[in-house]
Amino acid sequence: MKITLAHGSGGKSTSDLIDKIFAKHFSNPVLNMMEDSAVVEGSKKIAVTTDSFVVAPLFFKGGDIGRLSVCGTVNDLLMRGARPKYITSAFILEEGADTDDIEKIVKSMAKTAKEAGVTVIAGDTKVIEGKGGVYINTTGVGFVDDNTDIKSSNIVPGDCLIVNGTMGDHHAAILSARMGIENNIKSDNAPLTEIVHALAEGGIDIHSMRDITRGGLATVLNELADASEVNIEIYEDKIPASDEVRAFSKILGLNLLNMGNEGKLALLVPENQAEKAVNIIKKCRYGENAEIIGKAVDGDGVTLVTSLGGRRKVSVLIGEGLPRIC
C-alpha cells in the first residue's frame, strides 16, 4: 500500500496506519495508553537530545533510517554519561511512500531500541506532498548520575585519545549505495550503550566523549580542542580503518578524517587509565578494534603526526561533505 494524504488526516486512515505498523511494533504499556503525552518515572538529573534523520537511501548495507535514528539519538545521550531511557519517534511521510518499507523501518527501530535499552514512549505521524520520502525525528531522554560530569571542556594536557574502531564505514556505505558501487563495506551504525556502561562500571574517569558523526574525526576533535583550549595530537599510523574503506577513500579522493561514522566515539581519559579503558572497550560489542590514537598537549587545534614523523594542522570539514548521510 502507498501512503496518501488521507493517512495524515487524523481520521480512520491515520488510525489504521498507526495500529497496523507503529503500535504493532512499538507496543509497550506507556505507548499503548495513546495519551497526548507520556508520564514516566524520572530522575534528578536528565540529559535530553533531539535529532532528525533524512538519510538517502533509506536502506543501505548494515542498516536503515530506522536503526540509524535510534543509534544517533541514544549515542548523543551516552556521550554525556547518561543512561538512555526513553525516546520519541515522529515520522514525516511523503505521498507515495510504501507501507511495506515503513513497516521494515519501524521493525528495525523497535529491534534497535531493545538492543540499546530504551523505550519508545511517544510518537507522531504527518503526511505531506512529495515523491515517497520518509523522514524521522527523535527525541531522547537519559538519566545522569549526580557525580557524572562529562563534557567537551574537561580535557587536560596528558589525556589520551581513544576511538572504539574503524573510521569512515558509514560514509563509505552510503556513498557506495548512491553510486551503485558493489563492495562489502557496511555502515557502522550501532548503539554504544554497552561500551559506555562498561567504562563507567570499570571506574574509568572519562573527561570527554563525543560520537564521531558528520564531519568525521577531524571536526569532532577540533570542537573538543577548542572547548578545552588544548592541542590534540593524533597519530596517522594508529587511526584504524578497514582496508576496503582505505582503498575506497583513496580512489575517490576522500579524506578519511572527514568521513562520517554512526557507531564510533572519541574518548579522552587520564593517561594512567588509557590501557585499562581500551581493554574494557575491546571486550564489548562494537569495540573490538579500539585504539589509543593520540593525546592532548599544550597548545590549540588538532595536529596530525604523520607516519614519517611530520606534523600538520588538521582543520574541520570545510564545505558540504556528503549531504543526507544521516
Image: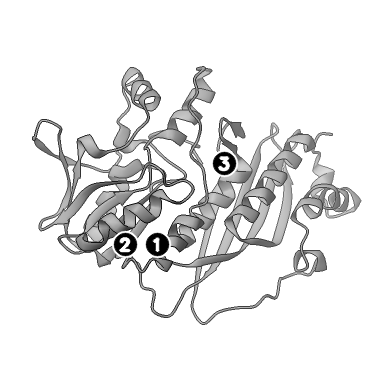
Q: In this view, does 138 lie to the left or right of 184?
A: right
SS at mark 3 in the image: loop
Q: Give the labeled residue for mark 2.
A: 208
- Percent of width and height locating residue 128: 71, 43
Q: How far apart are marks 2 and 1 (CA)?
A: 13 Å
- Percent of width and height locating residue 189: 51, 42
User: What kind of residue is marked 1?
Assistant: Leu
Q: Distance between the residues labelled 3 and 2?
A: 28 Å
Residue under the point 71% across and 58% down: 123
Which image quarter holds the N terminus?
Answer: top right
Q: How far apart are marks 1 and 3 (CA)?
A: 32 Å
Position above or below: 47 against 185:
below
User: What kind of residue is marked 3?
Assistant: Val
Q: Give the labeled residue for mark 3.
A: 54
Q: Which of marks 1 and 3 is in front?
A: 1
- Percent of width and height locating residue 310: 8, 35
Q: Which of marks 2 and 1 is nearer the N terminus?
A: 1
The local crowd at label 3, few if under 14, some if 14 to 19, many if 20 or more residues have their Cα within 10 Å, is some
SS at mark 1 in the image: helix
Position above or below: 299 against 103:
below
Q: Which of marks 1 and 3 is nearer the N terminus?
A: 3
Q: Which of marks 3 and 2 is nearer the N terminus?
A: 3
**Pointers 3 and 2 in contact (CB under 8 A)?**
no
Q: Which mark is residue 199?
A: 1
Q: Nearer the viewer, mark 3 or mark 2?
A: 2
